[in-house]
Image: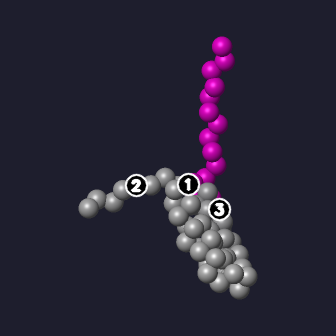
Amino acid sequence: MPEQKTGYMTELDSWTNQVVIAPLLDRGPQAISDVQKAIREKVLESYRNGQKAGPRRPQNKQQK
């Protein structure tokens, strides 16, 4: 079966359910430090991906 591409927001929702919501429901307050760590890692990953992509180039907008 070929892999189906999913959008970033769909992947983020899946990650959120798996890494944030499920542990909080299963373990309650004891999961908070693990969830915070996972969120920080995800934010850092996103930041590094943005750094690799480089600065955005301005779009030339045609004026009417």
Rendered position, 61 above or below 32: above
- Residue 46 x/y as whole percent: 61, 62
Q: Report, in whole angstroms, how far the alpha carbon at label 2 lies from the one at label 1.
A: 12 Å
Residue drawn at x 71%, y 75% as measured from the top left? 36
Q: Name the residue under label 1.
A: 9
- Secondary-structure class at tag 1: helix
- The stretch of residues the image draws in magenta is 51-64
Q: Name the residue under label 2.
A: 5
Q: Callout 1, which amino acid?
A: Met
Rendered position, 51 above or below 28: above
Give the foreground label among 2 and 3: 2
Q: Callout 3, which amino acid?
A: Tyr
Q: Callout 2, which amino acid?
A: Lys
Residue drawn at x 64%, y 49% as measured from the top left? 55
Q: Name the residue under label 3.
A: 47
Rendered position, 12 above or below 24: above
- Residue 39 x/y as whole percent: 66, 71
